[in-house]
Image (cartoon, rainbow, N blue to C red):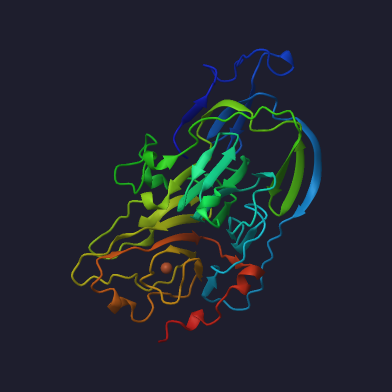
């Protein structure tokens, strides 16, 4: 969780009257809402609304966003080329799920139009990795600006709207939906809850909203709520971004991949040094530009390995990828459990005199097997398993 934050006006003690005048229906109060994680067991925030957050005028089914898993008759490596995917839908409806299991779903999203309705994911934390585009995530916690290579972490149940800046070009997102709470690797934190000296990033690299932005509107507004595949449309009796103040540990925040301080060694360091986030069932790692290994005989690309009890997804973001041939920006590779993979032929020799790499990639390692969707198989290069022969 990011650090404690307090924005706007909150009363000196929680669960006490936060007075205003005249207030909704002349009650003289702002209305408290406690936003928790894992029931009431873990981090929470307390927000104060102009009006009670429970005022719903209509609830109706709004269809489904089904994730259609493709049958996989063989266990093999995959290379999905997603760079040419057409723009479609908006930042919510335009998501194309590619890889999924019970813990996590990875989608690509190249929105073609502004977000039509407010949105809330009731069942998953979302990490929106901004490959391209800039803009603002508007939520009840206040506006949160984002830029290329930001991870925008949105706790489940946050009502939000993504607004892209047209000057930022065609937006392009990798969307990670996590059934469990997304947090940081516990080993990065000292017993006092602070990032340790030596962790690859720290509190100053995490950015939450800078201020609240109160929308005072009694007009009906629709909200699309997603839980799993199911979509429900709520018509709210007022705008939900009516928060005058809040405090706590639960709020959307950004972390930019270029703020990741890579750890290097005299010889190749293992993937956990790149870890950025941790969630039940998977980890997210950032392969950031870094100095390569300095031992005179160091092999500067990763050793071949069979990732036992783990499926390994790399999403290639920027730069030249030293250990891979044929991957482009926006390629995914999926190296499943139990089948070795390693540097492509020629890349060990080609990297011998290199001193640094400029590649940027996002890795998602899952501990349960991943399934490919039908849309993923449309992007699949079936010759990839044989790409180590020559
Ligand atoms: Fe690997």
Answer yes or no: is residue 173 visible.
Answer: no
Specify the farthest residue to the bottom.
390
Query: What residue is at 25 percent from the left and 65 percent from the top?
Result: 293
For residue 179, above or below residue 249: below
Percent position of residue 313, x then y: 49, 65
Q: Say whether residue 229 is left or right of residue 245.
A: right
Query: What residue is at 20 percent from the left and 72 percent from the top?
Result: 297
Answer yes or no: is residue 220 visible.
Answer: yes
Disc tally is 0
For residue 192, above or below residue 161: above
Specify the farthest residue to the front.
167
Percent position of residue 218, x then y: 74, 28
Percent position of residue 314, x then y: 47, 65
- Of the four image quadrants, the one with ligand 1 is bottom left
Query: What residue is at 54 percent from the left and 71 percent from the top?
Result: 81
For residue 16, above or below residue 57: above
Q: Say whether residue 359 is left or right of residue 280.
A: left
């Amino acid at each position: 969780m990011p650090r404690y934050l307090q924005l706007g006006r909150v009363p000196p003690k929680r669960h006490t009257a936060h007075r205003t005048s005249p207030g909704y229906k002349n009650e003289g109060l702002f209305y408290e809402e406690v936003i928790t994680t894992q029931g009431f067991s873990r981090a929470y925030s307390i927000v104060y609304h102009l009006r009670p957050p429970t005022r719903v005028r209509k609830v109706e089914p709004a269809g489904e966003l089904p994730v259609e898993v493709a049958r996989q008759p063989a266990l093999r490596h995959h290379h999905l080329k997603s760079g040419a995917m057409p723009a479609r839908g908006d930042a919510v409806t335009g998501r194309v799920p590619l890889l999924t299991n019970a813990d996590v779903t990875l989608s690509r999203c190249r929105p073609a139009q502004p977000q039509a309705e407010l949105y809330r994911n009731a069942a998953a934390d979302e990490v929106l990795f901004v490959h391209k585009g800039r803009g603002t995530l508007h939520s009840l916690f206040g506006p949160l600006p984002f830029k290329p290579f930001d991870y925008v972490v949105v706790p489940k149940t946050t009502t939000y709207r993504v607004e892209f800046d047209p000057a930022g070009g065609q937006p392009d997102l990798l969307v990670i939906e996590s059934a469990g709470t997304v947090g940081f690797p516990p080993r990065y934190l000292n017993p006092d809850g602070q990032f340790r000296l030596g962790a690859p990033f720290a509190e100053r690299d995490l950015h939450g909203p800078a201020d609240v932005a109160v929308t005072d509107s009694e007009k009906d507004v629709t909200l699309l709520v997603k839980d799993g595949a199911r979509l429900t449309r709520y018509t709210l009796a007022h705008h939900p971004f009516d928060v005058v103040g809040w405090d706590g540990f639960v709020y959307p925040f950004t972390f930019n991949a270029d703020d990741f301080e890579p750890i290097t060694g005299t010889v190749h360091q293992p993937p956990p040094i790149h870890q950025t986030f941790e969630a039940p069932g998977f980890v997210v790692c950032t392969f950031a530009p870094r100095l390569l290994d300095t031992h005179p005989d160091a092999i500067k690309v990763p050793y071949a390995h069979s990732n036992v009890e783990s499926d390994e997804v790399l999403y290639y973001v920027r730069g030249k990828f030293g250990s891979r041939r044929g991957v482009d920006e926006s390629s995914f590779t999926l190296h499943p459990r139990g089948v070795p993979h390693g540097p492509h032929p020629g890349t060990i020799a080609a990297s011998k005199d290199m001193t640094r790499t400029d590649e940027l990639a996002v890795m998602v390692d899952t501990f349960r097997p991943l399934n490919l969707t039908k849309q993923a198989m449309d992007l699949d290069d079936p010759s990839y398993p044989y790409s180590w022969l020559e």
